[in-house]
């Protein structure tokens, strides 16, 4: 065999190696999450080290914390960034490549939402969330275990993949979280779930250039199972409204009595304690005129019918709040205070008018 023939075979062999490396799928391990890929040493052997081509910065092993008040729906967004690029040769991958994503985690098939579970120390209530990713003007709701965006044409090409960046640039990404049910009434506590993000550069790169094919049959570089946690903290709130002055009505032989109904709402219907303080009393409820009359104060939970005689300045626990902040416009008031003056007290009265200021305090347990 002549030297010329051997040289030609060697050149062909190098070309075939390059073509094979360019078309095969390989995995990044996120070894350079926040850089431009140049941190991966450049050698002939590792020019196609896929750690150079895909990196996710600011998400892996992080906890994304959101706070839920009583405002329905949108909870907030968390920023991170993605490097998605390619190079045939050089220290920095110059060509921006688009990508698709999959988010995995516990999910509710019926609601088609991801599940956050309340810490078991306070019960095991759950809520469902939607996750949306947006980057470079591209925005997609990410259903559980579903590659997004999906193929949109017969040849598997996708027109709305998430954008990569030239020269290894980190492209900003926003992860937004929203309740599946905007009116979900959550009890106070911490709801959390662990999820993974996977990124797929779709298609192939050959001598004719980048071919955008994203039908699951062709992969380039991929980065799987970036673990992160979403944590939703619900603020404990309680509100008292609708209390009105009580005018006592005298019934001969029975004494005097009166009542007022009002609303006590709390986050997720959380339990509360109620305390009644008499402005004139010290351990007793006292009406003040030219002399004093003792009276009793009874609290009643209207939905359940539970009632209890209150002790002045002593908290009474275990009352469930209404889940709506205004008890459905005060049409479903859930609490009542009943005041009664016994006939024996009235028989001793030396005046015709008696007053007291009764202060009601409600606190979450």
Image (cartoon, rainbow, N blue to C red):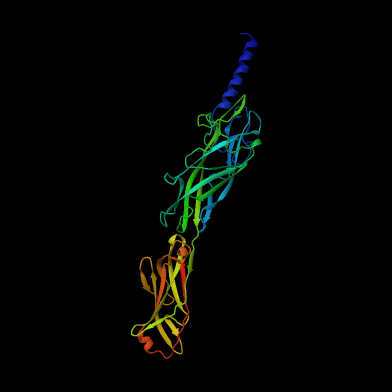
Q: To which quarter of the image does residue 271 belong?
A: bottom left
Locate residue 153, reporting x and y percent: 53, 31
Residue 3 or 224: which is nearer the viewer? Answer: 224
Q: To which quarter of the image does residue 350 belong?
A: bottom left
Residue placed at 63% from the left, 11% from the top? 5
Locate residue 97, reporting x and y percent: 60, 34
Please tell me whether residue 280 is drawn above or below residue 104 in the rendered image.
Answer: below
Please tell me whether residue 5 is drawn above or below residue 159 in the rendered image.
Answer: above
Quadrant position of the N terminus in the picture: top right
Looking at the image, residue 20 sits to the left or right of residue 334; the answer is right
Locate residue 313, reporting x and y percent: 44, 76
Looking at the image, residue 264 sits to the left or right of residue 221; the answer is left
Q: Residue furthest top?
A: 1
Residue placed at 44% from the left, 47% from the top? 111
Q: Residue furthest bottom?
A: 350
Residue 283 or 239: which is nearer the viewer? Answer: 239
Quadrant position of the C terminus in the picture: bottom left
Looking at the image, residue 350 sits to the left or right of residue 231; the answer is left
Residue 164 or 30: which is nearer the viewer? Answer: 164
Q: Residue furthest left?
A: 253
Residue 66 or 356: which is nearer the viewer? Answer: 356
Please tell me whether residue 18 is drawn above or below residue 101 in the rendered image.
Answer: above
Residue placed at 63% from the left, 14% from the top? 8
Q: Give the mark count.
A: 0
Please tell me whether residue 76 is drawn above or below residue 295 in the rendered image.
Answer: above
Locate residue 67, reporting x and y percent: 53, 55
């Amino acid at each position: 065999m002549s030297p010329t023939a051997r040289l030609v075979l060697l050149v062909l062999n190098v070309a075939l190696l390059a073509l094979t490396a360019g078309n095969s799928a390989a995995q990044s391990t996120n070894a350079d999450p926040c850089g431009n890929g140049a941190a991966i040493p450049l050698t002939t052997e590792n020019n196609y080290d896929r750690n150079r081509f895909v990196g996710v910065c600011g998400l892996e092993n992080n906890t994304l914390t959101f706070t839920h008040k009583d405002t329905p729906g949108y909870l907030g967004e968390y920023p991170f960034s993605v490097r998605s690029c390619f190079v045939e040769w050089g220290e920095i991958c110059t060509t921006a490549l688009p990508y698709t994503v999959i988010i995995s985690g516990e999910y509710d098939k019926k609601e088609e939402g991801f599940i956050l579970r309340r810490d078991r120390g306070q019960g095991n209530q759950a809520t469902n969330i939607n996750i949306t990713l947006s980057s470079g003007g591209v925005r997609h709701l990410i259903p559980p275990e579903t590659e997004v965006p999906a193929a949109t044409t017969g040849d598997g090409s996708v027109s709305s993949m998430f954008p990569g960046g030239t020269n290894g640039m980190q492209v900003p990404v926003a992860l937004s979280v929203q309740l599946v049910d905007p009116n979900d009434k959550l009890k106070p506590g911490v709801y959390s779930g662990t999820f993974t993000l996977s990124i797929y550069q779709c298609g192939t790169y050959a001598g004719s250039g980048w071919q955008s094919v994203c039908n699951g049959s062709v992969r380039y570089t991929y980065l799987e199972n970036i673990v992160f946690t979403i944590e939703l903290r619900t603020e404990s709130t309680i509100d008292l409204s609708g209390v009105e002055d009580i005018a006592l009505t005298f019934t001969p032989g029975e004494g005097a009595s009166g009542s007022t109904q009002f609303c006590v709402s709390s986050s997720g219907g959380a339990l509360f304690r109620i305390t009644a303080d008499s402005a004139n009393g010290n351990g007793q409820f006292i009406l003040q005129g030219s002399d004093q009359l003792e009276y009793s104060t009874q609290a009643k939970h209207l939905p359940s019918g539970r009632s209890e005689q209150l002790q002045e300045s002593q908290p009474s626990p275990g009352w469930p709040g209404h889940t709506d902040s205004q008890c459905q416009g005060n049409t479903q008031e859930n609490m009542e205070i009943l005041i009664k003056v016994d006939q024996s007290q009235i028989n001793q009265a030396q005046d015709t008018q008696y007053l007291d200021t009764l202060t009601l305090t409600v606190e979450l347990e």
